Image (cartoon, rainbow, N blue to C red):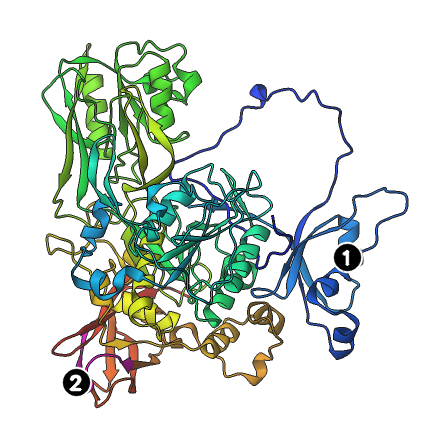
Amino acid sequence: MAQYRSILTIIGITFLFSSFTTNANERPVDERPKEKQSNSQVYIVHCEFPDSEGTSRYQDLDSWYLSFLPATTSDGSREAPRLIYSYRNVLTGFAAKLSPDDLKEMEKKEGFISARPEKQLDLYTTHSLNFLGLHQNMGFWNDSNYGKGVIIGVIDTGIFPDHPSFSDAGMPPPPAKWKGECEFNVTKCNNKLIGARYFQSSGNGSPWDENGHGTHTASTAAGNFVPGANIFGNANGTAAGVAPLAHVAIYKVCSAITCSESDILAAMDMAIEDGVDVLSLSLGGVAYNFYEDVIAVGAFSAMEKGIFVSCAAGNSGPYRFSTSNDAPWILTVGASTIDRKIKATALLGNNEEYDGESAFQPSDFPPTLLPLAYPGSNDSDILAKYCYPTSLNNTNVTGKIVLCEVGITPQVSKGEAVKAAGGAAMIIMNTENLANTTLAEAHVLPVTHVSYADGLKIKEYINSTLIPTATIVFNGTIIGDDRAPVVAGFSSRGPSYTSPGILKPDIIGPGVNILAAWHVSLENNTNTNSNFNMISGTSMSCPHLSGVAALLKSVHPDWSPAAIKSAIMTTADVLNLGLNFIEDETYLPADVFATGAGHVNPSKANDPGLIYGIEPADYVSYLCGLNYTNRQVGILLQRKVNCSEITSILEGQLNYPSFSIKLRADSAAQTYSRNVTNVGQANSTYSVEIVSPPGVDVKVEPTTLVFSEVNQKLSYQVTFTPLPSNPSTGYYQGSLKWISDKHIVRSPIAVRFSFF
């Protein structure tokens, strides 16, 4: 592994619905000789650039950073401090392994600002492309040349380079600006996979993917065309990434379980150095102040250099204030369904039928009714309802269909436990929070995953009869669900905890039951296998939007990251295929804290009419307006800042393509300005259309925007006034549209009423 790395960010990786548990009684005994325990840990250290005198003393940043490390003690009483990463693009500082005594000595050094222990963060397709309106040899895909010439950097668990999704058939060489490297032990890179790097905590000393997550996300963003892709014969078709002719560079920062901040920052730093155009991070953690969030810090540097950053919103829905990666210079992506289901129906002995899903659909499963068991009836074992392996030891499930509930262990693991206990098949029922979000997964035995409401009905049936029975009828791939897209129950929701005046998430995209490349060949008891897998999460929706950004970058190379984000947001769909408002997991209309601006529509984003631009300097005024200290703002900017010399702005004043306003019943009117740039026809006129949130009067001045040339900028003001009949508390929504004869430019409005 190369010794030099740059940018650091901590991100832990947790797969959707996965739960890693440890039983202390089951740990193996460590027979190795005991070594002296170290109290050192990795810290991320912020420091100031040396002055001119210091610059002459230290020839490069590495020697400057090394000067902060205390000398080792002569008696060897503590572990020597160790420099791990020197950051050059995303942070003025470094990562080092330090003891508490080392830290005390370092704090006395001139130029030292702060140090904190690094955190660990979580990891958060055949038909999905057609669902997005992308078709070969026509439309936006053809117009954008499939993303040719654009480089997508994927920061994840690595990659399986031999997968056909990463073939370079039809691919041009990488652009001349590319500076990256391939760190496989053997030559695995090509004109598709142009770079592969790994970082110290990520695994076995190679960019190789031992987890599958990185392979899946990379192929979703930019996998090449692979005909005949399927999972055990289902969802058959030609697989491709959203930008199939874009180049891919992989940065392995995550092990099978977690990702460290220092590695993430280093990867982002290196990706900027290498020359990527788009960064895709399906990772995240708890929302922090932006100056404490390594992804936000690294993304700010990337944005300043014209690199678009797309991140997963997180899998902590449907709870409010659960979004991560919510800095305004990041595109924050939530997850939704597509109109394809891999249908499996639970048929009960009372002739009731309940539709669910499963990616494994055996053709030889008998239609005869089998005994139906619910281990959760065992009140003495609270884990039994989750089909935890040890909980099935004293339960007779041999030859039966077993009802299991979502939770504690991954769904596939539940099936493994049921199979090991002699069960014939399994029905999985959702939690109340996940409601109707069902998953089609690669199970090891016949399964159907049903909704929470249907699971309750199945429980009622079990309790109503002495000998409950059931079978599972497998219906294969069904396309045409006119409810799609539906917001996934797990998709994290706003408002933003860090900056509630910025509406998050920004957008939703396909993230449920997404078929993409996998790092191993999946096998099950039918001796069939697949080198594609179907998984779910905002980890899957994020690379869809990374690919869309690459397509837009290919067509509009002069567009800034803010312009690309604006085009994506203002053209988003708010109606489903049935022409009703997009619903959430409960099949009720979803609110803006679930959908953001709406569901991505790539073709419309290519011709948005107007865009909301944001310059890097605008973010400085915004950050000072958050009441960050000069030093805290300086961490993001990597230079000294004096907010008293800068015109600060309120969050709502940032030229964002959406509005998130907090009002009190007795508060005065709030007025914010926006400016838009004409990227449509030279001579065009837009008229405003307002849908005011309940309890608010929304006025716009002027009500008409008249453009006479391309790239012309015009401004308008929006005033939000609480009405006498306004509610005292709660969240409400509306919209503001600029409409011409060819374009609709829509901005969602969220209003929160509160007592204080």
Q: Quadrant of the C terminus?
A: bottom left
Q: Residue furthest bottom?
A: 708
**Disc number placed over residue 625 in the picture, else none:** none
Q: Residue 717 appears in which quarter of the rendering?
A: bottom left
Question: Going by the image, does 148 lie left or right of 329?
Answer: left
**Looking at the picture, how far across and down is residue 649, in whole percent?**
45, 78
The boundaries of the magenta stretch are 677-690
Tell me the crowding category of disc 1: few under 14, some 14 to 19, or many 20 or more residues within 10 angstroms, Cα based.
many
Circle 2 residue: 685
**Looking at the picture, how far across and down is residue 451, in whole percent?**
23, 34
User: Callout 1: helix, strand or loop?
Assistant: loop
* 680 falls in the magenta region: yes
Answer whether residue 106 is visible to the viewer in this image: yes
Alpha carbon of mark 1 to alpha carbon of mark 2: how far? Answer: 62 Å
Q: Main secondary structure of the magenta part?
A: strand
Give the vertical position of 266 relative to 126 (above or below). below
**Looking at the picture, how far across and down is residue 6, in whole percent?**
59, 59
**Looking at the picture, how far across and down is residue 615, in whole percent?**
43, 78
| Amino acid at dot 2 | Thr
Instruction: In this rendered view, identify the residue nearer to me: 700 or 424.
Output: 424
**Disc number placed over residue 69 in the picture, else none:** 1
| Amino acid at dot 1 | Leu
Question: Going by the image, does 222 lie left or right of 576?
Answer: right
Give the vertical position of 323 relative to 428 (above or below). below
Give the vertical position of 73 relative to 701 (above or below). above
